[in-house]
Image (tube, grey):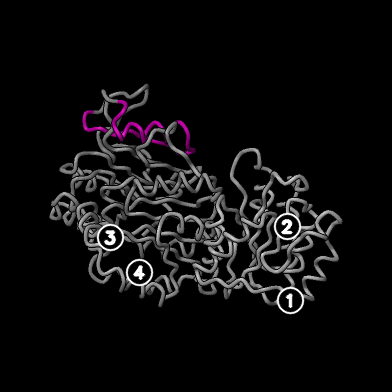
Amino acid sequence: MNFRAFFEPRTVAIVGVSLSNDRHPANVIYYKNHLRYPIKVFPVNPKGGILQGERVFTRVSEIPDKVDLAVIAARAEHVIEIMTDCARAGVGAAAVISGGFAESGRRDLEERLVAVAREADLPFIGPNCLGIFSPARVDTFFLPSERMVRPEPGNVALISQSGGILVDQMIKFAGEGVGISKAVSIGNKALIKETDLLNFLARDRGTKVIAFYMEGFGRNEGREFVLAAEKCPKPVIVLKAGKSPAGSRAVSSHTASLAGDHEVFSAVLAQHGVVEAENEAELISFSQSLSCYRKSIQGRIGIITGSGGHGAMAVDACVARDLSVPALSEADQAEIRAKLSASAQPIAALGNPLDLTGSGLDDDFVAAASHLSRTPAFDCLLLLLLPYIPGITADLGARLSQVYSREGKPLVAYIPHVEKYRMLIEGFQLNGVPVSHSIEGAVLMAEALRRCRPC
């Protein structure tokens, strides 16, 4: 199967455009790609005609150019005929946005669609999905451009059975500064399933972390997935719905999947080295952390803060997740204190957390981080930075990132995410150090490193 046609198409046919309703999903997809992406886009409707000055083709096989990707947003009863025509035209791949298949009881229609695609060796995503978002290349989501929030290009791939969950995650990734390489809504996953995408993304140079939102599997799909994930050289993260009996029923009605026994599934994920996220917050934090670091840790955390209260909350959050917070030896404390500024030296508490207080300066944070980075008792540092402390500057993030570059011990940071502190945050992010807007999120980043097997 040629998966490149999904993510790097040069020609795209949008099947199902309306000549009278510009709000039709197919029209939204057509205008977005026609106006904003570096691809040739062809509108298709059986009636033909003209759409804002562009010829509307009656079928895909009528298009004079070879079509890399067909996006099908027509009534379910017409999709098999359209797919047959796509096969005849030698289309490289398809995204079937249309609903009305197995999720609504029409499993027979879905099986016929798969049979047509298999016979023609024509891979398709869906049906009942949003399809594909590949930054700066193609976007098959039927969401108006002005309403979409797009993360910056990055190295995390998101694959979701639910289009709504995928869009929510993209919004939250954008808010946290987590970039994505690709995003795929697979819906009913009638032909292409999670394992197929996992195997492709394992070889994709632009992807470092592969994150899934799952609702369930068909027969033997779960086993195939975990075996492929175990072999994958990149971190694999899974957030699964359908953990409760009521959730399982909701999953079945949404994408016609079998949710299965969650406790068994969770144990199997852990056995095969897959990082399971319990909720959306964990998915975001895990993705951000593992996109920066590939090194597994035991979970011995050194905490540096400018506020004793923040340090205490961080300790509680670490302990709740079985991360240890070892005390710093008196000799180490004395050595760090000797390097502190005159304002912080007499009042800093250095037992772990290291509370440099509101009198701490940039140099104090750098000195403490440098020392802990060379201390074997810790394998990850948690930096709780309060930008309103008078002695902290916008350069501190970049300076602390240099400590990581020099020493190699993972750092995770907490900074309140408001525009006023953007330069401080970017100093970390531009140098590959993850930043969370909450203490709990920063602790989750460290937890991800403990739970991820070495790659």
Gap in angstroms between the C-alphas marked 2 and 4: 39 Å
Which residue occupies the foreground of this view, 6 or 411? Answer: 411
Label 4 amino acid? Phe
Give the residue number, with chain letter if any, for mark 2.
400
* x and y, in percent, of residue 45 in the image: 25, 32
Q: CA distance from mark 1 to mark 2?
A: 23 Å
Could you give the CA–CA distance between mark 1 and mark 4, rounded to whole angstroms? Answer: 46 Å
Quick check: 376 left or right of 250? Answer: right
- Which is more N-terminal, label 4 or label 1? 4
Name the front one of labels 1 and 2. Answer: 1
Is 179 colored magenta in this rendering?
A: no
Answer left or right for 291 relative to 221.
right
Horizontal side, residue 245 vs residue 92: left or right: left
Q: Which mark is residue 319?
A: none
In the displayed structure image, the side of residue 452 where residue 398 appears, left or right: right
Which mark sits nearer the N-terminus, 3 or 2? 3
Mark 1 or 4, closer to the camera: 1
Magenta residues, start to end: 22-47
Residue 281, horizontal then vertical, whole percent: 46, 55
Specify the label residue 242 is tagged with. Answer: 3
Looking at the picture, tell me which residue is in the foreground, 146 or 356: 356
Q: Where is 128 relative to 234, above or below?
A: above
- Identified at 41% across, 46% down, the residue is 168
Report if the CB atoms under discs 2 and 4 are less than 8 Å apart. Answer: no
Looking at the image, residue 224 lies above or below residue 425: below
Circle 4 sits in a helix, a strand or a loop, which is it? Answer: helix
Closer to the chain start, of discs 1 and 2, is 1
Tag 2: amino acid: Leu
Q: Which mark is residue 225?
A: 4
Amino acid type shown at disc 3: Gly
Q: Is residue 32 magenta?
A: yes
Instruction: Specify the quadrant of the image occupied by residue 443.
Output: bottom right
